[in-house]
Image (tube, rainbow, N blue to C red):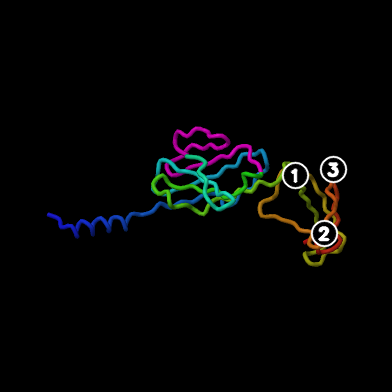
Amino acid sequence: MCSLPGVLLLLLTGAISAKEPWIQESPAKLWVSPGATAELSCSISGSPWHANWYREKPDGSLEWIYESTAASKPKGKYSGMMRARGIFPLNISNVQREDSGYYYCTSSVSHSQFGKGTRLLVTGESGSVWRCWGHPWGHPWGHWVFPLTFRCLRAQGLNPGVSASLGSLPVLPRPKKSPFTLRALSTALF
């Protein structure tokens, strides 16, 4: 016969040893152009059968947006059927700038635990970004001779992790035609 303290100790030990699932959303950051489809993924240990996706609102609260299962149906712009036990995609079709933000998933078992999330960045209007390239032939980095010349073409999005700044120089009018030539007059551009 079991005593009440023994039963309580057994219950507490079981509750303490219960392992929380491991959750990871990927990629950590995703850059997409307006109108494209963003493809996010969530991996959860313990092989749950479904996961819930949330979007962080501007006030910091989380808004439920989609449940991913083996039989999930699209819900508006959201879709994503479970690929394998523990792998839950979220596809966001026809993304727009207002879709930018952080997305999180949680296990069907533990609704209180989230991964680090995926940051979705919608990069402005499609085709409004310029990609430029060039090379100061014959001069190593730091020994360039100015002015430098770069060739630029209209592109469909930004290269992940790449940014540019004109520093304190005045911003030139936006080019209207593709391709065009950009001349760097000093290192203030870099």
- Separation of marks 2 and 3 at Cα, in angstroms: 24 Å
Q: Nearer the viewer, residue 163 or 167?
A: 167
Q: Earlier in the sequence, mark 2 or mark 1?
A: 2
x, y (%) of residue 50? 43, 41
Q: Which residue position holds label 1?
A: 155
Quadrant of the image containing the C terminus: bottom right
Q: Which residue position holds label 2?
A: 136
Residue at the image position 78 percent from the left and 62 percent from the top: 167
x, y (%) of residue 132? 78, 51
- Separation of marks 1 and 3 at Cα, in angstroms: 12 Å
Would residue 160 be counted in the magenta stretch? no
The answer to whether marks 2 and 3 mark residues whose Cβ atoms lie closer than 8 Å is no
Q: Nearer the viewer, mark 2 or mark 3?
A: 3
Residue at the image position 44 percent from the left and 40 percent from the top: 84
Residue 165 falls in image quadrant? bottom right
Q: Is residue 140 above or below residue 19?
A: below
Q: Is residue 176 left or right of residue 36?
A: right
Could you tell me which secondary element the residue under label 3 belongs to? loop
x, y (%) of residue 64? 50, 43
Q: Earlier in the sequence, mark 1 or mark 3?
A: 1
Q: Is residue 183 left or right of residue 125?
A: right
Q: Nearer the viewer, residue 41 or 138?
A: 41
x, y (%) of residue 179? 83, 45
Within 10 angstroms of label 1, few (less than 14), some, or many (20 or more) residues? some
Q: At label 2, which amino acid type do we have?
A: Pro
Q: Which residue position holds label 3?
A: 177
Residues drawn in magenta = 68-96
Q: Earlier in the sequence, mark 2 or mark 3?
A: 2
Within 10 angstroms of label 3, few (less than 14), some, or many (20 or more) residues? few
Could you tell me which secondary element the residue under label 2 belongs to? loop
In the image, farthest residue toward the front: 59
